[in-house]
Amino acid sequence: MAWLPNVNRRSFRTDLMAGLTGAVVVLPQGVAFAAIAGMPLEYGLYAAMVPAIIAALFGSSWHLVSGPTTAGSIVLFSVLSAYAEPGTAHYVALALTLTFMVGVIELGLGFARLGTLVNFISHSVVIGFTAGAAILIAASQLKHFLGMDIPRGLHPHEVLLHIGTHIVEINPYVVAVSVATLVSGLLFKRFLPKFPYMIAAMIFGSVVAYLFNTSLGQAVTGIKTVGALPASLPPLSMPDFSPETIKHLLPGAIAVTLFALTEAVSISRSLAVRSGQHVDGNQEFIGQGLSNMVGSFFSAYVATGSFNRSGVNYAAGARTPLAAVFAGLLLMVVVLLVAPLAAYLPNAAMAGILMLVAWGLIDFHHISLIFKTSRTEAMVLAVTFFSTLLMELEFAIMVGIIASLLVYLNRTSRPNVRVRVPDARLPNRKFNTDAELPECPQLKIVRVDGSLFFGAVNYVAERLREFTEREPRQKHLLMVASGVNFVDVAGAEFLTREATSRRAAGGSLSLYRLKEEPWNTLRRGDYLDKIGWDNVYLNKSEAIADIVRRKLDHDICRHCSRRIFNECKAMPGPEAPLIE
């Protein structure tokens, strides 16, 4: 409830109108989703009532609206159709049980603080997935936008190919209603931004459709409407808690949970990027879990974040989760009072509205920025985008996450290993990375910027070997460890091997500015005993002074003309050291 202080008269009014818009939008969608899930049609509306309220109050996102979704309904059908006949009382009971189980798993993950898993969904993945989902939304609405019969389950490019080969089947009256809705929405948004343009567009499109049907007849126009909906509130229900049922449904519940959480968090994060809000993954898991657990007792099947409703909610100007609460409450009122009027709401008008929503979900600014600034991030975005178009949504998200993780692992497994030397041109002779500066012939100073873990040690070892091959006389190595945040067992073993091999060759390995966590790892594993406690230093001056005095070969120093350290002044040698 951290958002509660942000509620004021203006936000309350805005959230109320956004909630009303969302309640109207979900009417035809809920019916369609229930049909896809194999549930009685009214259950699609029930799933958009109580779960939306609970998820809004206990979740983290300000704009996420939970309820039935296309993908969630498909997954539910694929899991349950093997155990019961769709639409039967037994099928409904299994759906309610599955919903409760999904909620329990989601809640458990939230309490286990596993919401940090969402940190592996990078910004590029979210942007690409959102853009791909927007295309999917638009493609799914083309049949209503054009008044054509398009087979279900086609990919966007297949939808366009079907339209191209059946272009004569386009219904001009339906297109007129769709375009009228689309254009009126754009005009209201542009010139009357304070008025809820989506509701205005729905009304305008409905009026156009009504005029066509009354003047020409629906048999001529072919303009289909949503149709009258059942006017009832969600009845109380009881899931089946028998051990046998739970045993059968558990694998499916786990699969549905992973998909539902990924979808909900991806949507909440994509909207958070646009609104500048921070999303707490753990709290979002808890909110989703409670919404499904409570919803299962109010005749709701699996609910998760809805791209359509959340996009509508954000586009309608919602400012706090009260918008989703209002959407759930107002849907109950709408179902009771206005459900029969849905007979006048054309599918084409709904398609026009969802086209506006889909366009608004594509973040052209950030897409352009990512392609300008990072080739690897652009690749991740493109992989996620095309995976979303060509694969099932849950797999598309996973592909994007895997691509992002591969980029991350590639970066972390190749930490910067930079040569550092004192620079007389800088104040206090600060260390610098400049290939033109002279180095000590006996001491190599490198800085490692990155963690020394199992994936990075081979790369660091190769870099150090290259340095040794170029300058075999630099048997002593001083590693600047201020950039090393983490050392695992493999990293600790690497440091001990490096120390041992250099000691055997007459040199040494020294560390300075070692952070607390790497220090504790090396200390607990007795690795500091092998490296040598006297080879670990707190600061640069102490390290160089001790190495020059105690470890370097002074015969070599006597004939060295480089003299790059202040400590070299006290060493016998050439008359004109390069110290100044």
Image: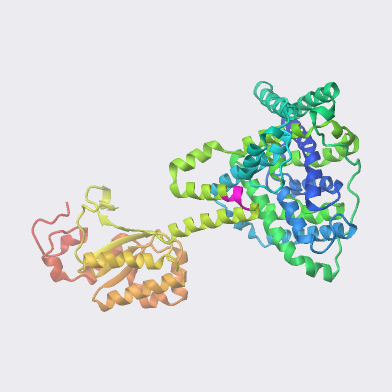
Q: Is residue 445 left or right of residue 344?
A: left
x and y percentages locating residue 23 in the rendered image: 79, 38
x and y percentages locating residue 326 in the rendered image: 79, 39
Q: Is residue 381 left or right of residue 433?
A: right
Above or below — where is 540 with respect to 372? Answer: below
The dominant secondary structure in magenta is helix
x and y percentages locating residue 226 in the rendered image: 82, 36
Which quadrant of the structure image shows residue 331? Answer: top right
Question: Does the rendering let one see residue 279?
Answer: no
Above or below — where is 309 with respect to 204? Answer: below
Question: Residue at 57% across / 53% down in the picture?
Answer: 121
Q: Nearer the viewer, residue 430 or 438?
A: 438
Coloring scheme of the render?
A: rainbow
Question: Residue at 22% across / 47% down in the picture?
Answer: 425
Q: Is residue 389 magenta?
A: yes
Q: Which residues are magenta?
A: 387-391
Q: Is residue 528 left or right of residue 96?
A: left
Which quadrant of the structure image shows residue 495? Answer: bottom left
Question: Does the rendering let one see residue 469?
Answer: yes
x and y percentages locating residue 52 in the rendered image: 77, 46
Q: How many marks?
A: 0
Q: Is residue 324 magenta?
A: no
